[in-house]
């Protein structure tokens, strides 16, 4: 069983992040390119990996922004 620490450090693919955030993988790429979503690059092929804790922080920030926008 993974501890909370281990699961937070797990590296995710673009597809996995897209599934978590319920968006298209290209949207994840666009957010990463814009610097909105932190990622790590480990290979010369440019493959990106994302930490679960960064994805969850991004999600929490966007939920908060949407609530503030709707309150107006």
Image (cartoon, rainbow, N blue to C red):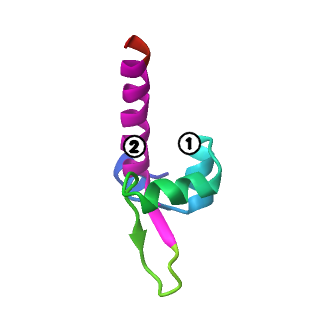
Residue at the image point whose x is 43% and y is 79% from the top? 42
Number of callouts = 2
Magenta-drawn segment = 48-69
Residue at the image point whose x is 36% and y is 42% from the top? 57
Q: Is residue 10 left or right of residue 19?
A: left
Q: Are marks 2 and 1 in contact (CB under 8 Å)?
A: yes
Residue 16 pos. (x, y %):
60, 55
Residue 47 pos. (x, y %):
52, 75
Reading the image, the residue beneath label 1 is 21
In the rendered image, residue 27 lying in the magenta stretch gets the answer: no
Q: Is residue 9 left or right of residue 45?
A: left
Q: Secondary structure at mark 2?
A: helix
For the residue pair 33 and 51, the one nearer the viewer reads as: 33
Asked if residue 59 is positioned above or below residue 3 in the image, the reply reads above
Residue at the image point whose x is 37% and y is 13% from the top? 72
Asked if residue 62 is positioned above or below residue 31 in the image, the reply reads above
Q: Residue furthest bottom?
A: 44
Asked if residue 55 is positioned above or below residue 60 in the image, the reply reads below
Q: Quadrant of residue 50?
A: bottom left
Label 2 environment density (alpha carbons within 10 Å; few <14, some 14–19, many ≥20): some
Residue at the image point whose x is 36% and y is 20% from the top? 68
Q: Earlier in the sequence, mark 2 or mark 1?
A: 1
């Amino acid at each position: 069983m993974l501890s909370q620490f281990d699961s937070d450090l797990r590296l995710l693919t673009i597809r996995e992040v897209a599934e978590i955030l319920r968006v298209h993988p290209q949207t994840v790429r666009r957010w990463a390119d814009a610097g909105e979503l932190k990622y790590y690059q480990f290979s010369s092929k440019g493959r990106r990996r994302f930490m679960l804790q960064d994805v969850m922080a991004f999600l929490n920030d966007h939920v908060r922004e949407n609530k503030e926008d709707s309150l107006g």
